[in-house]
Amino acid sequence: MSVLLRFHTVSDTDLSEILQEPIKLEILYYGEVLDPSALDDLDDEAKDNILTWTPEVKSDVLYVEGMFQSLHYLLTAESDTNLGAFPLNFLNGKRQEAGEIGWGPVTFYNSNDVQIIAEALDELDLSELERKFDPAILNEMRIFPRGYVWKKDDIGSLLEKIKEITAFLKETKNKHLGLYRIFV
């Protein structure tokens, strides 16, 4: 089974609501609380506050899918999750976490984080990334997807995905929104 990465836009207001009450993440992502019995220990006012909450913004989605580890390595020179420095470790690094969807905690980036990430991506020298790309290293390090044999021409699809991510982050920045990241 493959692990896939997706980014969803979120307003800072919604992010704040979720950090205060993580079960609201289910409403943000699924449109409802999946297990209403999770609210049984709350008083009626708290339950009502959760069940009547609606996100301020409808999320846009960016599908990075299975390329996340190779892109993380290309941007940070790190193969392990959570390594590399912010802002370029955003594909696989830790930031604010709340709740779980898919393969673990959901990571949030507020609108200020998005601005920093978008600026860092905009400043990337793609020709330098292309020069540094060494498929032998990715194969040796078993960079995801496991079992795939990296080739020199794979850099084209990686650079296209970086361009797509850069455009998405720029648009998100211009809307003054944040992001949340899930692995499914």
Image: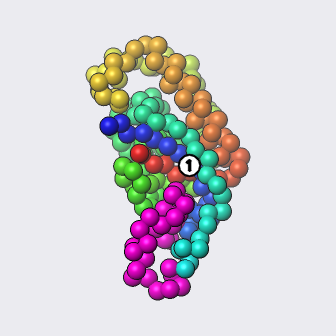
**Residue sitting farthest toward the top:** 152
- Give the vertical position of 66 relative to 138 (above or below): below
Name the image quarter holding the C terminus. Answer: top left
- Where 153 sits versus 170, above or below? above
Residue 25 is situated, as x and y percent measured from the top left of the image, at 50, 62
- In depth, the one of 53 and 8 nearer the eye is 53
| Residue 153 seen from this side | yes
Secondary structure mostly seen in the magenta stretch = helix
The quadrant of the image that shows the N terminus is top left
**Dot 1, how many residues are within 10 Å of its Cα: few (below 14), some (14-19), or many (20+)?**
some
Query: What span is colored magenta in the figure?
Result: 18-47
Magenta stretch: includes residue 37: yes
| Residue at 48% across, 62% down | 26
Which residue is labeled 1 in the image?
8
Q: Amino acid at mark 1?
A: His
Residue drawn at point x = 59 percent, y = 74 percent:
52
Residue 165 sits in quarter: top right
Q: Position of residue 160 (x, y in %)?
A: 56, 25
> Which residue occupies 47% across, 57% down?
96
**104 sits to left or right of 128:** left
